Amino acid sequence: MQTWAKSSGPERYPIFVEQGAGGTMITCGCQAGAMGQMCKHKVALIEGDASFAVSGHEAGWQEACEAVQASGIPTAYAAFIEEQDAIEKQMEVLKKQAKASKGMFARRLSEGL
Ligand SMILES: [Zn+2]
């Protein structure tokens, strides 16, 4: 099925929910979506964010959201978000380590090497 997603400007983008050999697919006609990236429209559809529905096409948006909810996408998306959060936490730890290392080297420089 096809519906429309709002952009931040006056444009609107066609967004498709289709059955493929591997399961349910979401494709979007925006610039990022056309390059196969995870655009904000795909995220909005997965998260059921109705604020991205184009005026007059709310029912189609809702229908597309329901099709996504009935697929394997929500479970995979939840695992993806969990993985992203874990990576973000690791990055925070690494940033602290990098800062500590920088401080340590600055101290060594002031003490003499
Ligand atoms: Zn998009």
Image (spheres, rainbow, N blue to C red):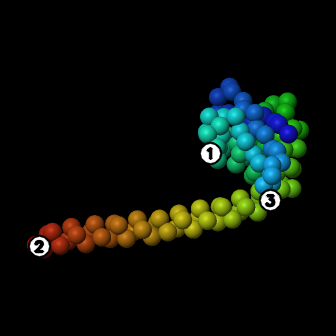
| Tag nearer the camera, 2 or 1 | 1
Mark 3 nearby-residue class (10 Å; few <14, some 14–19, many ≥20): few
Looking at marks 3 and 1 on the same chain, the residue that comes earlier in the sequence is marked by 1
| Res 36 → quadrant | top right
* Distance of label 2 from label 1 (alpha carbons): 49 Å
Quadrant housing the N terminus: top right
| Res 14 → quadrant | top right
What residue is pinned by disc 3? 72
Residue 2 position in % (x across, y down): 82, 37
What residue appears at the point 80 percent right and 49 percent down from the top-left corner? 20
In this rendering, does residue 6 appear at all? no
At label 1, which amino acid type do we have? Gln
Q: Is mark 1 within 8 Å of ligand 1?
A: no
| Residue 25 falls left or right of residue 97 | right
Looking at marks 2 and 1 on the same chain, the residue that comes earlier in the sequence is marked by 1
What residue is pinned by disc 1? 37
Residue 9 position in % (x across, y down): 64, 28
Label 2's element?
Answer: loop
What residue appears at the point 70 percent right and 42 percent down from the top-left corner? 41
What residue appears at the point 81 percent right and 52 percent down from the top-left corner? 21
The relative height of residue 106 versus residue 57 in the rendered view (above or below) is below
| Residue 58 falls left or right of residue 84 | right
Mark 1 nearby-residue class (10 Å; few <14, some 14–19, many ≥20): few
Q: Residue furthest top?
A: 10
Q: Residue furthest left?
A: 112
At label 2, which amino acid type do we have? Leu
What residue is pinned by disc 2? 113
The residue closer to the viewer here, 18 or 41, is 18
* Distance of label 3 from label 2 (alpha carbons): 58 Å
